[in-house]
Amino acid sequence: MKRVIINVVTAFICMLIQMNITSAFGIDTLCQYGVIAIILSAATSMNLVTSSVATLIFALLCDIFVSGPIGIYAFCLMLVFGITHALLSRFRSERMIALMIWAAVMTAVFELLLACAYAGIYKDFHYFMIFVNHLWKDLILTVLMTPAVMYLNQLAEKIFTHRKTSSLV
């Protein structure tokens, strides 16, 4: 339970930092920290029920900051959560390069789902052009940030987990 909360809180804090940097400098690239949190929860065998609830809460919090119809971002992120857990239960690997590849694939799936949802709701093909123009930048940033988020998760777990030491007392 503690690992799940640390995973989601780390992703949320990284997302808030990214939003501040993006708004300050006008950067038009996003790292999908929600997808990274999903990949890490699926790859490290976290509890499915608690990680799905934590991911849903994270997705609803992220949905507040996303423009568009309410719930679309959360719905697409939970679809990616289901797809990721279904696929990674079959092809389990905890190697960093495999996690980076899964992060790239699931980021592409997530952004395609968002583009399809927005195009269907607004009946405008423009969202697919945004998807094509921004996908490669988002993929590169998400792949590069996957090891960093995993390191932050491990560091936070070391800090917040009480280890018993042997003593004579």
Image: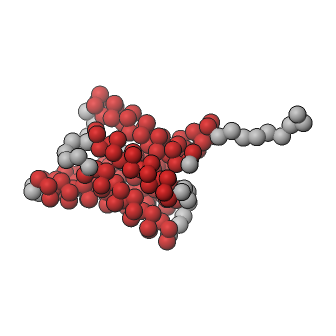
| Residue most extreme to the left | 123
From the viewer's perspective, is 86 left or right of 151? left
Q: Residue at x 35, y 41 (%)?
A: 61
In the displayed structure, 51 sits above or below 163; it is: below
In the displayed structure, 152 sits above or below 76; it is: above
Q: Measuring from the top left, give residue 1's x and y in whole percent.
A: 56, 49
| Residue most extreme to the top | 24
In the displayed structure, 65 sits above or below 49; it is: above
Q: Residue at x 18, y 53 (%)?
A: 118
Q: Measuring from the top left, give residue 74's x and y in whole percent.
A: 31, 51
In front here: 126 or 57? 57
Q: Measuring from the top left, give residue 27's x and y in whole percent.
A: 28, 36
Query: For residue 161, what is the image quadrant?
Result: top right
Q: Which quadrant does the C terminus fall into?
A: top right
From the viewer's perspective, is 26 left or right of 20? left
Q: Is residue 136 visible?
A: no
Query: For residue 66, what is the image quadrant?
Result: top left
In front here: 99 or 86? 86
Q: Residue at x 34, y 54 (%)?
A: 77
